[in-house]
Image (cartoon, grey):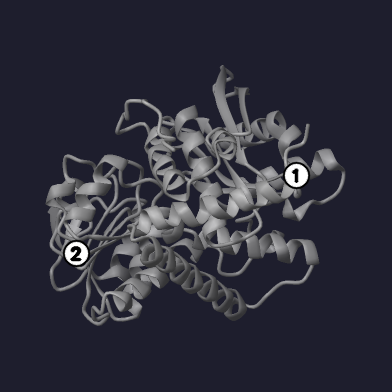
Amino acid sequence: MTLTKDIPLDEVNPFESMMSRFDHAAELLDLDRGLYAILRKPERQLIVSIPVKLDDDEIEVFTGYRVHYNTARGPAKGGIRFSPDVTLEEVKALAAWMTWKCAVVNIPFGGAKGGVVCDPRGMSQRELEHVTRRYTAEIMAILGPDTDVPAPDVNTNEQVMAWIMDTYSQHARHTVTPIVTGKPIEMGGSLGRRDATGRGCMLVTLEALRHLGMPVEGARVVVQGFGNVGSTAARLCAQVGMKVIAISDHTTGIYDESGIDLEAARAHVRENKVLEDFRGGDRLSNSDLLELDCEVLIPAAMENQITRQNAPRIQARIICEGANGPTTANADGILEDKGVFVIPDILANAGGVTVSYFEWVQNREGYYWSLERVEKRLKKIMVNSFKDVMGYTETHGVSPRTACYMLAIDRVATVHRLRGLYA
């Protein structure tokens, strides 16, 4: 049975890129046509207007999105991003990736994502707070600890989560800590949450090196994106003996074959917000950085960084996708033919949602874990999930990316079969 539809694949459309991979995995699973139809569409798509009075007393109306892709396995889970580039297609793709991500690491959440079309870099703290609170009020009908639990994403942070939690709690007339994750520790956040995504990247990179019989000590690492995920992954990879030779953000790239001084780079970013003017190595562009000779490449910036145009020039032996969708579907086959071992985003960066799950559990039981317990449980889940994916890779003779999708779709489809169809 052929499930793939005759839809031309726009390489930079994240939703169609994701769905092309879904279609391939669904065909290999011989997924029932009815389940295929259910899993190929988001359950719910909400578009809201967010009127806000700015500091100059002008009123601007922002657009916000919240998408629930699938909630068969549990409450919708997914971040909220603030960016002028947010689109509904992007949010749909990210919500779908969250569905598969939660299933790959086998935690009881479905997938969601949200976003507001705005440029937070040009907004005051007061304006950001007003946008956040009004957006929360507009989507409140679908929020809840048992229905939809947001988290931070691009250009949002613990403070934004605190505003969301407070806004929801004001309407509920009592404090509702499990309404969001990624909160400040003082408000019920989990220890280890800030480093969780980067730590997950490091853990699966270690497993990939071992799986391929490659030495950890001295393995050269290139990191695109020096935000929370990229900087954490770089620091932790260096701590276990790897050598980070290049880093970048949206302003510049830095290369030093003897190894970047990561503490100095992090201090520079804390003081200046960006890597620009950091003197710790030679300058290079983000595009050149991706093509450096290295053992491990961690794209931890934005979507669509590795495409069919630059994939033939990628020299990394392992790609660990710290960002969501950094590799387009059209690049997959090129990388596979080159023998590049790709740790897909829905596994590689699942450490964040895993510790978000831990935070949600701690909030609900009113008992908080030690950092040691959080990190131990995160390691167990990431290592076991890597092994589960490798099992599918070997059993079905497919790439790790296809194996991830097959594993995730199989788990979500199984729950749909057990629950049946409500009519």
> From this viewpoint, is residue 189 visible?
no
- Image position of 106 with respect to 124: above or below: below
**Where, by quadrant of the figure, is residue 297 drawn?**
bottom left
Front in this rendered view, residue 61 or 347: 347
Question: Disc 1 marks which amino acid?
Answer: Gly
What percent of the width, then of the height, locates residue 14?
39, 36
Q: Residue under label 2, please give it.
A: 280
Quarter of the image with the N terminus in it: top left
Q: Are marks 2 and 1 in contact (CB under 8 Å)?
A: no
What count of labels does the image hold?
A: 2
Circle 1 SS class: loop
Q: Which residue sits at x=47%, y=50%?
A: 29
| Cα gap from disc 2 to disc 1, whole angstroms | 46 Å
What percent of the width, then of the height, locates residue 256?
15, 66
Q: Residues within 10 Å of mark 2 (few under 14, many from 20)?
A: some
Question: Disc 2 marks which amino acid?
Answer: Gly
Circle 2 SS class: loop
Q: Residue under label 1, please give it.
A: 144
Front in this rendered view, residue 387 or 79: 387
Q: Which residue sits at x=25%, y=79%?
A: 213
Residue extending farthest to the front is 1
Left or right position of 222 against 353:
left
